[in-house]
Amino acid sequence: MKPPPVAGRGRNTTTSRNVANSGVAARLRSNPWLLAGTRLAVVLVLLVAYQVFSVLNPSRQGTFPPLQSLWGGIVTLVTTPTFWTATLYTLSNALIGLVISLLLGGALGLLLSIHRAAYGSARFIVDFMRAIPPLGLIPLGLLILGPTVEMEITLIVIAVLWLVLVQVYFGVMNVDPKLLETARSFRIPPWRRVLFVTIPAISPSFATAVRLSATLCLLLALGTELLAGSSGLGSLIATLQRSNLMPQAYAAIGAAALLGVIVNGVLVMGERRLLAWHYRTTRKATA
Amino acid sequence: MTAMRKKWIRHWGGEVLLAVWLPVALLVVWWVVTDTGASVFFPSLRSILGRFGTVWLGEGFTENVLPSMANLAVGVLCAIVLGIVLGIVLAVLPAVELVIDPFLQFLRAVPAVALIPLILVIAGTGPSGKIWLIAFGSIWPVLLNTIDGVKAVHPEVRQAARSFRVTRGNVFWRVLVPGAFPQISIGIRLSLSIALVVMVASELYAANQGIGYYVLLAQQTFRTADMWSGILLLGVIGYLLTVGYSAIEARILRWRETPAAMRR
């Protein structure tokens, strides 16, 4: 007997469409060279389109310079030592801000997790401080500290601290009570309980805090430099743009973007490596 | 019944008291300390609150607050709508998503603030550039969370919709969007806070109106009470955005078994 034609047709079309759809994806996934080639082709098409646009609009070449002058800007930028010192400033300010925020926020988060009433009392303040857009504090920072490194780092810490605090607090709250009860029933002393149970248990959520806040620190460092003029890659971008050296300014903006990508990539990789044990155990639990 | 109500009031009364005492105490301390020994940098809270009324609620509301809020609203709405639509399209076309994924990851990692000079050159100081920038900065959380959320909609749900011959448009709006919404919502929440930051930042660099512009101007002309009141306003706006979105989210996701308010 034949199956009813309607149902049969319906099923056939859906499966064949699914196969066709995932077929291309599967072929791309199984062949890294093909995938890389396709991506490269996309880049080339975009570059050619941009170049055509730029060449056809000579009056707008100040804003959209052709590729050869963009390349010139990149070369000039990476051969000037100012660029490298500026990048170093930005990175070190972001890093100092990150370390201070992690220490301060982590300590405050642990402190608030001691008693329910502590977080309950502080909750409104934490939520309100988190809600203030950090770069909005630039005028205040300029007023009190001026366009200095101290101002930049203070601003980063004031903004990032709360994110770490909340992540650590909820990390502690979500520690499996069975772990703590087991530790207690083995009469493991409190300080060892914190060191060997609580801290490993909250490390995944702390790692998330590190990743999120590192990206935020970099953004705030660049933003403060650009808007308030403390020295670094951000203020270099502003200077280049104001002196109308657009190809170099674009190159510097691209460098800032690349910095963001690299920092994010390094952190994701580090997280995967350091927390491999966590991913292993959770995968086993879900499987 | 009345006993339960009394217990309820006692319980929630305690919660409210717990949540309120520290902020109130800090405000009182701020008020007393600055009222007796105000400096140029730290004007008295009395004068800050006084200036708040005149600067932000009267004429300044239409002059500085409204343009900022309009840019924010338009930019965020563009980001949300575009992010959801593009996210669903990419989620149902895995080959395209696979090819352009590194580009999306790169664009997401671009600090939007660094693009302010670029946007200024391309679009000028008017609102359109700021809106573009807000939309660009805040689209990524929505887009990437939509892709993940739609992919996580169980394939059986999609197949069931297909076998019932649900039209494509209906699958889109009645199956994929609601199914992915809990995840999309996380993205929207993130993008709201990013949008606020980008909005303020865009008003601090070569702008001629807006809250950020006014706050910077007040600082440069040493009207510190005005500046403090502006920062207070930014905090209030940010707080209301978070609280307001939580309320909207809880309403949209009422159908779920675990209310969204319980999740982080």
Image (spheres, coloured by chain):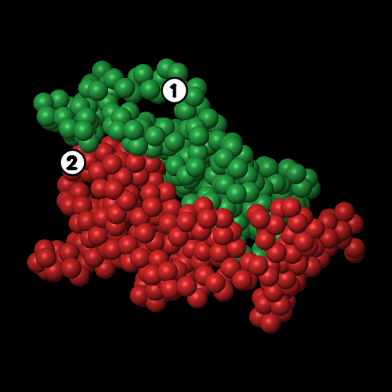
Chain colours: A red, B green
Give residue B180's position: percent from left, percent from top: 58, 49
Amino acid bearing label 1? Gly
Q: Disc 1: which chain?
A: B
Give residue B76's position: percent from left, percent from top: 56, 40
Residue marked by disc 2: A117
**Which residue is located at x 32 percent, y 62 percent?**
A93
Q: Residues within 10 Å of mark 1 (few under 14, many from 20)?
A: some
**Which residue is located at x 67 percent, y 52 percent?**
B86
Q: Quadrant of residue B216?
A: top left
The mark lying in front, picked from 2 and 1, is 1
- Mark 2 lies on a secondary structure that is helix
Q: Is residue A245 above or below residue B125?
A: below
Residue marked by disc 1: B60
Q: Which quadrant: the N terminus of chain A? A: bottom right
**Residue B84 or residue B150, whichever sits in front:** B84
**Residue A256 or residue A7, whichever sits in front:** A256
